[in-house]
């Protein structure tokens, strides 16, 4: 029995596939179409492989439909000065840092620590979209701390595969 959104999406998309395409039925009932569209509108990072299956079955292009391919909307925190996205997580060679606030410019540093608190890397961030090269990091979990010029900071974790 599916317990996560990823498992539920995959099971739903696969069962619709088996119920239709295998029987040479290529038109969906309205309810079936709505279920597939709901899955296709999710991001693969949060909706899993079922998202790809639904998109293929509907011939659905997320770029043409304004679907965010990175992450779904971040939870809003009214006291935030800056809103950032760190992706992908887990990452391989590169980690993107995207500022999604209304500010035109900002100045910050990202510091990356290993799980025992040792500083591994530091990088200046000046643009709304920056990337951090992770090629020198080993597989594992890391902690980031983004410190802004005004003293505000944000912390989080990411995994390197």
Image: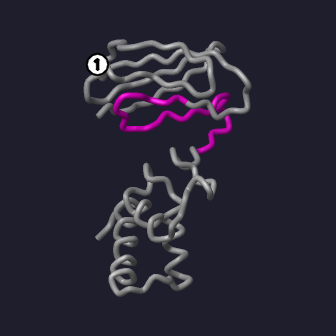
**In this orientation, which residue lies closer to the viewer: 115 or 42?**
42
Q: Residue 89 location, x and y as percent? A: 40, 38
Quarter-wise, where is residue 138 in the image? top left
Q: Is residue 24 left or right of residue 149?
A: left
Asked whether 79 falls inside the magenta stretch, the response is: yes
Query: What residue is rendered at 55% in x and 56% in y?
Result: 62
Residue 111 or 117: which is nearer the viewer?
Answer: 111
Q: Which residue is mark 1?
A: 116
Residue 147: x and y in percent read: 55, 17
**Which quarter shows the C terminus?**
top left
Relative image position of residue 117 (x, y in whole percent) = 33, 16
The crowd level at tag 1 (other Cα within 10 Å; few <14, some 14-19, many 20+) is few
Q: Magenta residues?
A: 75-97
User: Residue 56: x percent and y percent?
Assistant: 44, 65
Q: Is 145 in front, or is 18? A: 18
- Residue 153 is one of the magenta-drawn residues: no
Side (left or right) of 21 relative to 102:
left
* Vertical relation: 12 (above or below) 77: below
Q: Is residue 45 above or below residue 120?
A: below
Give me the residue at 37% from left, 23% from top. Answer: 134
């Amino acid at each position: 029995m599916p317990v996560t959104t990823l498992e539920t999406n995959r099971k739903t998309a696969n069962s619709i596939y088996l119920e239709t395409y295998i029987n040479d039925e290529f038109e969906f009932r309205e309810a079936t179409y709505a279920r597939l569209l709901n899955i296709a509108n999710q991001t693969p990072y949060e909706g899993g492989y079922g998202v790809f299956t639904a998109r293929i079955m509907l011939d659905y292009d997320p770029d043409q439909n304004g679907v965010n391919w990175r992450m779904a909307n971040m939870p809003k925190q009214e006291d935030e000065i800056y809103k950032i996205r760190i992706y992908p997580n887990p990452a391989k060679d590169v980690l993107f840092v995207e500022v999604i606030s209304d500010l035109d410019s900002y100045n910050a540093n990202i510091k990356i620590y290993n799980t025992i608190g040792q500083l591994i890397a530091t990088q200046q961030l000046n643009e709304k979209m920056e990337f951090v090269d992770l090629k020198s990091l080993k597989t594992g979990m890391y902690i980031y701390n983004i410190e802004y010029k005004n003293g505000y900071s944000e912390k989080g974790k990411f995994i390197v595969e």
